[in-house]
Image (cartoon, rainbow, N blue to C red):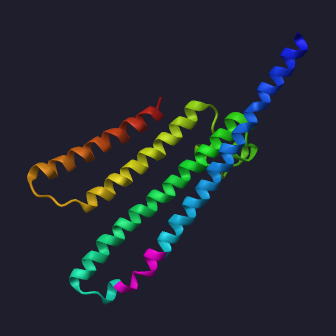
Amino acid sequence: MKTIAKTFETFLWNSRLMVIVAVIASLVAAMAMLYIASIDAWLMISHLPDYANAGTEDRLAIRTSTVTHVVEIIDGYLLATVLIIFALGLYELFISKIEDAEDSANASKILVIHNLDDLKSRLAKVVLMILIVKFFEYANKLTFGSAIELLYLAAGIALIGIALYFSHAADKH
């Protein structure tokens, strides 16, 4: 009976290695998002010479479009960082510690994950930044027809400020 239990425990312990599939998939998805955001950045930059030759109305449209594209590019890069942090966190939690991340003076401590709460905390901060960027993207496209609509925007900004305050206040504990 002890041999069966020991064999099962070994199998159960080694089953954690299945997480490597999620780690690799997350890294591939991160590379895809980095590629997409980089191509978007290149295309946006390549269209900027049109800005100097445009008329006043066209220049305003190009400027608005460029700001929107910049926000979308930031969103893509932030999503890629979420995927990288997720992959590193899963690896450290289930497979093995990453010695280079622990010992390196140049490594960011955001990439060192000690437990599930560390992973959730780091992911939550980046997701919050993605939501802020999305809010800015939508707010940039708004047109205000009344004072109440402007008040709604101000309330949204205030809520973002409160969310940032609480996310930073949690770090101090």
Q: Residue furthest left?
A: 146
The residue drawn where x is 27% and y is 80% is 59
Q: Is residue 36 left or right of residue 138?
A: right
State the residue in front, 145 or 153: 145
Tell me residue 163's x, y (percent).
35, 39
What is the span of residues highlighted in magenta in the rendered image? 43-50
Q: Is residue 128 left or right of residue 37?
A: left
Whether residue 47 is in magenta: the answer is: yes
Tell me residue 137's x, y (percent).
33, 58
Can residue 109 be seen from the camera position used here?
no
The residue drawn where x is 58% and y is 60% is 32
State the residue in front, 108 or 117: 117
Can residue 98 be seen from the camera position used here?
yes
Q: Is 108 located above or below residue 168 in the figure?
A: below
Q: Residue furthest top?
A: 1
Q: Is 40 located above or below residue 34 in the figure?
A: below
Q: Is 106 located above or below residue 159 in the figure?
A: below
Q: Which quarter shows the N terminus? A: top right
Q: Main secondary structure of the magenta part?
A: helix
Name the quadrant containing residue 6: top right
Whether residue 108 is in magenta: the answer is: no
State the residue in front, 97 or 91: 91
The residue drawn where x is 9% and y is 52% is 147
Q: Is residue 35 left or right of residue 172?
A: right
Q: Is residue 14 left or right of residue 57?
A: right
Q: Residue furthest bottom?
A: 53
Name the quadrant containing residue 52: bottom left
Tell me residue 148's x, y (percent).
11, 48
